[in-house]
Amino acid sequence: MRKPFIVANWKMHKNVKESVDFVNQIKSKLPDPNKMEVGIAAQAFALPSMVKAAGNSGLRIIAQNAAAEYSGPYTGEVSLRGLADAGVSYVMLGHIERRRLFGETNTSVHQKVQAALQRGVTPIICTDETMVQQVVNDEIHYVFHQLMTVLHGVSLDQIKQVVISYEPSWAVGAGQHANPTLAEEGCRLIRQTIAEYYSYEIADKIRILYGGSVNPNNIKDIIDKPDIDGALIGRASLDLDNFLKMISNAQLTLKEE
């Protein structure tokens, strides 16, 4: 069974003290990490302090972005080597805001994914609903073009380490009500695409999260769906009590299995 993963994406919110205080308050209230993972994606300057505060609680501290190069004359970039040395276990790559605001492309995200895998930092690859038709054996298949371009060259062994987050562009940061049925359909098609490019066995093991207007009222219905393995949560994760409520509601799906 795929382990659910609940991720807070704080974007450009919270300073070091606020981030560490949040970790200290939440770390003793987390679910069993063997049954459900919880992570926080924070700003780069807060990550080392958060890793130290999290200790052995099981809370995953996540980078929001990283460069494809490990070192060099790249002023302002975040090194994956540095993240790994700091104890950061995951990195988000290709978030829709990075694409919209900073012009990241499939090629640049692909390079970052390869660098993260080589450095031992698990990439959480964000992808939207961009799809294309392909004809295989005289049958029409709908393929997530953006995702598969990013995954090009990722080996069978490497793909097993990847986490994917489905972010439909109409739902991210828009305050729209997330539709569990549409969310499931997108995640199901992603899993189908991976199965066709790799294998059904591998596709069945990869965790696919949903990101887009997730809140305490809809999170259970969303991750209750068979192809959704967790959530990437934006503004609703900034408040401690709100985030704890979402984790608690997500845990209800475990109790019903």
Image (spheres, grey):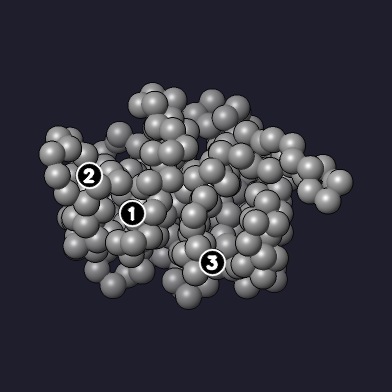
Residue shown at 64% from the left, 42% from the top: 144
Q: Quadrant of residue 177?
A: top right
Residue shown at 57% from the left, 46% from the top: 148
**Tag 1's secondary structure?**
helix
Give x and y (percent) for residue 64.
34, 44
Vertical comparison of 70 with 169: above or below: below
Q: Which label was assigned to residue 115?
A: 1
Q: Residues within 10 Å of mark 1 (few under 14, many from 20)?
A: many
* C-alpha gap between disc 2 and disc 3: 27 Å
- Toward the front, the furthest residue is 137
Q: Is residue 24 visible?
A: no
Label 2 belongs to which residue? 78
Tally the marks: 3
Give x and y (percent) for residue 4.
55, 62
Label 3 belongs to which residue? 156
* C-alpha gap between disc 3 and disc 1: 16 Å
Q: Amino acid at mark 2?
A: Val
Vertical comparison of 163 with 17: above or below: below
Of marks 2 and 3, which one's residue comes earlier in the chain? 2
